[in-house]
């Protein structure tokens, strides 16, 4: 009767009458809560979120919402099932007492838990100069309110929009502006858009897309200052090459910061790069010891991935949030032998300038790239990234139906360069070229995938706007 | 052994229920024997091959044709026309499909299929009224009286064939369909000639219509194919011709089978039929489950390897012929719980019925709408329908599998919705 020896009934009791608290009421938090109820959790469930809204979907905010095709408050996430939760919305969590098992809230309340899931995600990195950031017409884009505000500013017909940072969000914003017929300048510190996420070979394709759509794209430059008029409205930006751009809307799109400040001093292994957790989503404390009652999921998590040399990956991907939330929820309600690792292969998509971009794997690990299908110049292609003789990632432009194949190549550590022929192989697909990622020590808009090394104590990532 | 199993699958005697043979086939996920094709029968293997860029749909990549158990009947388009995008690889496939999609679906024409709804409803109403007025409710053939005429008319309307020419279209479609479905007793030479004539006449007719639409374009698809001025330029007349022939043939037979298999399955599951009667919205999950349970296209026999590949531990050489048995993958117990149960309440229903990857069914949104409307209206209006023969007589074709006739009786026909 080993079953009875190992299963002391505490799990059953937890499922029946335990208290589970989820901090972070967005995609990961909601999906985790739904999974817990699916798994028969009947105890109390508290959902804590600093925004006043029920969980909503963020990808449309930089796409349909900016075009005015969808209203920001119609982006609520569809519910898979009822979760019967105690919602504490509009109140941030401000502290954690691991010994007492309580979460402290901004209004002074304390909430006790038996199991805690942290899914506090990220926020937009603000413009580093607070006074300039306060100017009317300066935006970031992360929340529903951001999306609604920016949409209104665009609808008012500004003479020119300046987007600072040409990562995915920045590029999508520029694309939406052009679709609305607005003049737009994009300032990017790297040599091309998307270089941090996809490397310069692909970045150069993205740059052509910008220019072909009459975006005034300025690369290799930084915005050094924003200038306001006497009424406190932004009117111009000064660039590191000595030029300036007159713009009445400025969107700061410099990547994200992880929402971990509230955990400072708690003893949890949380910092600017996220919260370290094991493959089963259990959080590490600062001593490097794994906790048994605190779990992490979504953008704020950093977890080791077996496929990628057990590096700790932090992924700001929609699909990752869903998959990791599901694994975390499962593990929170399982005996240790029944727990599952989070082995999701990173994947993301973007849509800009009429092109559907999708990727699997970890492109920034790639040192070489080969176009296996189609052609960069036609902007319809599939390209594969190689790392130490194996396939590590792939990206497609308007060719996403082939991605499951490349995903499997990554999962099975298939050799690079690919030894096989494919449909639509062109001369440029005969030989790999350097993938041309920027030096990771140079701060840029922040790649979508952060490879953060083995140790939680190494480099910090801070944005420096330069001289 | 494999070859024997393949012959059994092709054998007309097993047409009514090939599923036990597929179950046998799945014991060897990739089976091969002598010079025949490599037959893939399990869900995950089929799914991954449908997304594998080392697989070609262009028969010019096929090495010496080995022993093809299907013989010549697999050639459904005729050598007279250049290959349609169904039988092409990227980039030509992508360009032609993109151009064809421009006047058909999102993002450029998101309303086309939706806007056909009233017209489809009218056609369904009319055909069911026809059953009512035919006078003989003791023997109704749902194929000849409903499932057959409905999709041809829909394609005519979509392409913009003038109403007065529709009867000619029905004749050609029937002749060509018969060529897909050889009657073993008919004289092959006679049949061959009839088919060639029908193809020729259809081609001439479409060519004339395309020329006419170039001069006087309307808002139909043929006009838009003929006068395309998108980023991919215009289709040549031959391209427009092979594309419209593809839409006609590929969109027709499959939809007939989907509707017929649907009514057959519903009549075998009266509880579901009763639910559909009370709840027409159930037609949506019913059609999805049908695409899994009784897919109109049972297998894809036209794929070729461009490299040596390995599938489920089996090495397949470059230039080999692949058969992807969709209908078997749809019943794979490793993928679907209780795969042999018809269950419209199934939550997990990512079937292979419409294929997957770049060649996934082009007309899927239209086919779904046609089948949903047809089944919900038949269920609502036919009073106490019952099968007269079970199994019904099937067509020859093992690939596009479906009943040739579906004889039923019913007690009455309710009036159409006001």
Image (tube, coloured by chain):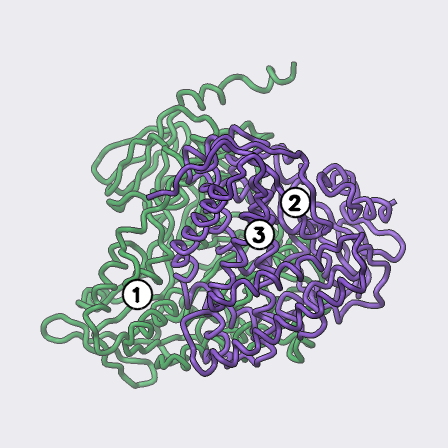
Chain colours: A green, B purple
Is disc 1 in contact with disc 2, using a CB cutoff of under 8 Å?
Answer: no
Q: How crowded is mark 3: few (under 14 residues within 10 Å), some or many (20 or more)?
A: many
| Chain where mark 3 sits | B
Residue A391 in which image quadrant: bottom right
Q: Where is residue A173 in the image (x, y as percent from the top left)?
A: 34, 68
Q: Where is residue A459 in the image (x, y as percent from the top left)?
A: 46, 59
Q: Can residue A419 be seen in this view?
A: no
- The mark nearer the N terminus, 2 or 3, is 3
Is A445 left, or right, of A333 in this rendering?
left
Q: Residues within 10 Å of mark 2 (few under 14, many from 20)?
A: many
**Which of the numbered marks, if any, corresponds to residue B403?**
2
Real-space Cα separation, disc 2 to disc 3, in angstroms: 11 Å
- Residue drawn at 40 percent across, 27 percent down: A114
- Residue highlighted by disc 3: B148
Of badges 1 and 3, nearer the viewer stands 3
Is disc 2 in contact with disc 3, using a CB cutoff of under 8 Å?
Answer: no
Real-space Cα separation, disc 1 to disc 2, in angstroms: 49 Å
**Which of the numbered marks, if any, corresponds to residue A67?**
1
The extreme bottom residue here reads A242
Looking at the image, is B149 positioned above or below residue A284?
below
Is B129 left, or right, of B144 in this rendering?
left
Share a chain, discs 2 and 3?
Answer: yes
Secondary structure under tag 1 reads helix
Looking at the image, is B153 positioned above or below residue B417?
below
Real-space Cα separation, disc 1 to disc 3, in angstroms: 44 Å
Share a chain, discs 1 and 2?
Answer: no
Along the line of sight, the residue nearer the viewer: A395 or A292:
A395
Secondary structure under tag 3 reads loop
């Amino acid at each position: 009767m080993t079953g009875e020896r190992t299963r002391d009934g505490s799990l059953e009791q937890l499922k029946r009458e335990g208290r589970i608290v989820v901090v972070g009421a967005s995609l990961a938090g909601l999906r985790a809560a739904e999974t817990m109820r699916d798994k028969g959790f009947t105890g109390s469930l508290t959902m804590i979120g600093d925004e006043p809204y029920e969980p909503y979907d963020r990808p449309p905010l930089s796409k349909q919402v900016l075009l005015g095709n969808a209203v920001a408050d119609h982006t609520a996430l569809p519910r898979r099932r009822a979760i019967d939760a105690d919602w504490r919305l509009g109140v941030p969590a401000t502290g954690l007492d691991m010994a007492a098992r309580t979460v402290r809230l901004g209004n002074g309340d304390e909430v006790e838990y038996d199991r805690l899931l942290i899914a506090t995600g990220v926020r937009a990195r603000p413009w580093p100069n607070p006074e300039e950031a306060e100017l009317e017409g300066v935006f970031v884009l992360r929340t529903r309110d951001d999306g609604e505000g920016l949409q209104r500013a665009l609808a008012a017909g500004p003479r020119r929009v300046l987007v600072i940072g040409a990562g995915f969000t920045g590029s999508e914003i520029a694309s939406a502006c052009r679709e609305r017929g607005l003049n737009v300048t994009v300032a990017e510190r790297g040599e091309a858009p998307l270089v941090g996420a996809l490397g310069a070979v692909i970045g150069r394709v993205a740059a052509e897309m910008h220019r072909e759509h009459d975006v005034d794209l300025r690369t290799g430059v930084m915005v050094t200052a924003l200038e306001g008029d006497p009424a406190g409205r932004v009117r111009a930006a000064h660039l590191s090459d000595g030029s300036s751009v007159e713009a009445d809307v400025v969107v700061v799109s410099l990547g994200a910061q992880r929402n971990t400040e509230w955990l400072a001093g708690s003893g949890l292994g949380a910092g600017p790069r996220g919260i370290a957790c094991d493959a089963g989503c259990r959080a590490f404390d600062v001593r490097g010891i794994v906790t048994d009652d605190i779990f992490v999921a979504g953008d704020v998590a950093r977890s080791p991935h077996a496929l990628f040399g057990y590096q700790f990956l932090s992924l700001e991907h929609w699909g990752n949030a869903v998959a990791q939330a599901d694994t975390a929820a499962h593990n929170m309600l399982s005996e240790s032998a029944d727990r599952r690792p989070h082995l999701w292969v990173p994947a993301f998509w973007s849509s800009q300038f009429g092109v559907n971009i999708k990727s699997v794997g970890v492109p920034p690990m790639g040192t070489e790239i080969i176009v296996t299908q189609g052609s960069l110049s036609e902007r319809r292609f599939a390209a594969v990234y190689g790392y130490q003789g194996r396939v590590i990632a792939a990206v497609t432009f308007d060719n996403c139906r082939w991605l499951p194949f490349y995903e499997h190549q990554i999962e099975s550590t298939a050799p690079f360069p690919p030894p096989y022929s494919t449909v639509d192989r062109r001369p440029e697909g005969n030989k790999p070229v350097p993938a041309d990622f920027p030096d990771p020590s140079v701060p840029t808009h922040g790649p979508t995938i952060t490879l953060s090394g083995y140790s939680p104590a190494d480099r910090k990532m801070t944005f420096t706007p330069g001289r | 052994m494999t070859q024997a199993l393949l012959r059994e699958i092709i054998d007309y005697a097993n047409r009514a229920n090939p599923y036990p043979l597929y179950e046998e086939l799945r014991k060897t996920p990739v089976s091969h024997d002598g010079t025949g094709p490599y037959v893939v029968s399990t869900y995950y293997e089929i799914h991954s091959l449908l997304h594998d860029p080392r697989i070609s749909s262009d028969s010019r990549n096929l090495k010496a044709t080995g022993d093809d158990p299907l013989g010549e009947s697999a050639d459904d388009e005729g050598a007279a026309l250049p290959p349609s995008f169904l039988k092409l690889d990227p980039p030509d496939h992508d360009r032609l499909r993109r151009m064809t999609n421009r006047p058909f679906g999102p993002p450029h024409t998101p309303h086309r299929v939706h806007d056909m709804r009233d017209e489809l409803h009218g056609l369904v109403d009319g055909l069911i009224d026809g059953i009512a007025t035919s006078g003989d409710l003791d023997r109704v053939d749902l194929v000849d009286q409903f499932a057959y005429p409905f999709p041809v008319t829909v394609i005519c309307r979509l392409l913009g064939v003038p109403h007065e020419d529709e009867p000619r279209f029905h004749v050609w479609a029937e002749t060509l369909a018969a060529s897909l479905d050889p009657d073993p007793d008919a004289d092959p030479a006679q049949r061959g000639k009839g088919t060639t004539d029908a193809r020729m006449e259809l081609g001439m007719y479409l060519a004339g219509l395309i020329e006419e639409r170039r001069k006087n374009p309307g808002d139909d698809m043929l006009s838009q194919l003929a006068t395309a001025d998108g980023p991919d330029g215009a289709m040549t007349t031959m391209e427009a011709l092979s594309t419209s022939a593809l839409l006609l043939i590929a969109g027709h037979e499959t939809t007939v089978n989907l509707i017929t298999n649907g009514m057959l399955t519903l009549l075998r599951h009266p509880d579901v039929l009763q639910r559909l009667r009370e709840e027409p919205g159930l037609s949506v999950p019913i059609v999805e489950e049908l695409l899994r349970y009784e897919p109109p296209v049972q297998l894809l026999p036209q794929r070729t390897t461009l490299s040596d590949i390995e599938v489920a531990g089996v090495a397949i050489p470059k230039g080999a012929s692949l058969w992807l048995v969709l209908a078997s993958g749809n019943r794979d117990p490793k993928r679907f719980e209780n795969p042999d149960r018809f269950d419209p309440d199934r939550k997990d229903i990512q079937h292979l019925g419409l294929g997957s990857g770049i060649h996934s069914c082009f007309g899927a949104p239209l086919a779904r709408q046609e089948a949903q409307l047809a089944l919900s209206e038949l269920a609502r209006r036919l009073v106490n329908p019952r099968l007269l023969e079970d199994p019904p007589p099937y067509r020859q074709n093992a690939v596009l599998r479906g009943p040739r006739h579906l004889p039923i009786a019913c007690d009455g026909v309710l009036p159409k919705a006001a």
